[in-house]
């Protein structure tokens, strides 16, 4: 039987536990724009008492430079309005420019605005702002999450901001800029990867390549029509699209798979579920994200599909049993 992405998406799906991350984001989505910005400020500064992101490099900030310069020159009221426009995905020139930013440039832009807000150069949350009951609910939900889940909520809300540029024709796209390199925060695991219960070469090579930012080697492991499904997203299909995605979003990640299970199917394809921890260069060794990889390897040993899922709780790291 031919492998399809749809059937691949459901491998081991009966072992998945609903994640509290989309539930928290759904609460956030119900807030007014003012409340959303206030929530992000409180969540970010509260989190900053224990963990803070690494400052983005100069090359990364340069991509956001023109917007930041425009904002610095504005009146406090205008600055607040720009932040609202971006958060509400309004169709304004600044919100459009933001919409074209890559994920990491969006994060760098807000990182810098946060610094400028702390320094009083950009308008802070209005004095006298009364925290609404809705903000309290989302903050309480956020506090119950582990740090890896908290930074995922922050990241995903920031990614969704800005005018939705996906519907615009290609002529409106700004020239593609090369993604600046993300420095690695921990020594690269260049030596061979070991995962309890797993010897599948494609998987071991995948982790090795990703931990060295060797995306060409990682892509070679996929079938031409293969797909990669990031957490809470639709599958990205085909080598070219996966390669572009990895260069934008998978740089500098430290992947530490711990254990896995494998099932061989009658057609010779293999299904594997592996759990472990991933660190992002934004937070380095200070935040571990508990994740699972669900691989479908074709009979020729190529990756047809891999889904990356955020785990609901650390217990899931260990509860690996085919059901
Ligand atoms: C302020 C107030 C106004 C509004 C805003 C503010 C600023 C907020 C800021 C937030 C910064 C947040 C950051 C979050 C970073 C999160 C990073 C994450 C990374 C997860 C990566 C994973 C990778 C998985 C993958 C694997 C693969 O095998 C294939 C590839 C891939 C306060 C001003 C907004 C500044 C920096 C969660 C899980 C394992 C799928 C990539």
Image (spheres, rainbow, N blue to C red):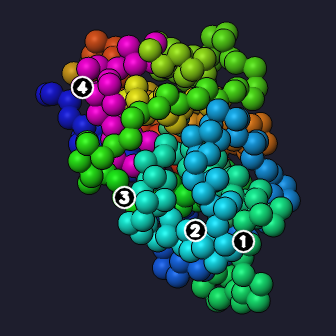
Mark closer to the observer (3, 4): 3
- Boundaries of the magenta span: 217-241
Q: Are marks 2 and 1 in contact (CB under 8 Å)?
A: yes
Q: Which residue is drawn at 32% across and 23% down?
A: 239
Q: Mark 4 points at which residue?
A: 225
SS label for mark 4: strand
Q: Name the residue under label 3.
A: 164
The answer to whether residue 213 is above or below residue 31 is: above
Residue 194 image offset from top left, x and y in percent: 62, 18
Question: Is residue 272 shown left or right of residue 149?
Answer: left
Residue 183 image offset from top left, x and y in percent: 69, 27
SS label for mark 1: loop
Q: How crowded is mark 2: few (under 14 residues within 10 Å), some or many (20 or more)?
A: many
Give how far apart the Cα atoms at labels 1 and 4 are.
48 Å
Give how far apart the Cα atoms at labels 3 and 4 are.
27 Å
Res. 278 visible in picture:
no
Which numbered disc covers residue 123? 1
Q: Which of marks 1 and 4 is nearer the N terminus?
A: 1
């Amino acid at each position: 039987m031919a492998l399809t992405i749809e059937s691949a998406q459901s491998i081991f799906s009966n072992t998945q536990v609903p994640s509290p991350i989309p539930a928290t984001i759904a609460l956030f989505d119900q807030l007014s724009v003012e409340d959303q910005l206030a929530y992000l400020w409180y969540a970010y500064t509260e989190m900053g008492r224990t963990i803070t992101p690494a400052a983005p490099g100069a090359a990364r900030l340069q991509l956001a430079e023109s917007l930041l310069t425009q904002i610095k020159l504005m009146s406090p009221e205008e600055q607040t309005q720009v932040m609202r426009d971006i958060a509400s995905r309004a169709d304004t020139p600044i919100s459009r420019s933001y919409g074209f930013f890559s994920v990491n440039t969006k994060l760098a832009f807000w990182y810098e605005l946060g610094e400028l807000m702390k320094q009083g150069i950009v308008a802070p949350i209005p004095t006298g702002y009364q925290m609404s009951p809705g903000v309290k609910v989302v903050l309480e939900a956020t506090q119950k999450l582990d740090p890896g889940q908290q930074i995922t909520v922050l990241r995903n809300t920031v990614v969704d901001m800005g005018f939705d540029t996906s519907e615009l024709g290609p002529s409106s796209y700004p020239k593609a800029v090369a993604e600046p390199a993300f420095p690695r925060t921990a020594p690269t695991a260049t030596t061979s990867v070991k995962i309890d219960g797993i010897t599948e070469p494609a998987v071991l090579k995948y982790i090795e390549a990703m931990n060295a930012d060797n995306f060409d080697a990682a892509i070679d492991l996929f079938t031409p029509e293969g797909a990669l499904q990031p957490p809470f997203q639709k599958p990205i299909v085909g080598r070219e699209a996966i390669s572009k995605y990895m260069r934008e979003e998978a740089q500098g990640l430290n992947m530490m798979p711990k254990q896995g299970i494998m099932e061989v199917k009658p057609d010779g394809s293999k299904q594997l579920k592996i759990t472990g921890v991933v660190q992002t260069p934004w937070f380095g060794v200070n935040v571990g994200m508990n994740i699972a990889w669900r691989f479908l390897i074709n009979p020729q040993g190529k990756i047809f599909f891999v889904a990356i899922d955020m785990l609901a709780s650390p217990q899931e790291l260990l509860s690996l049993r085919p059901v």
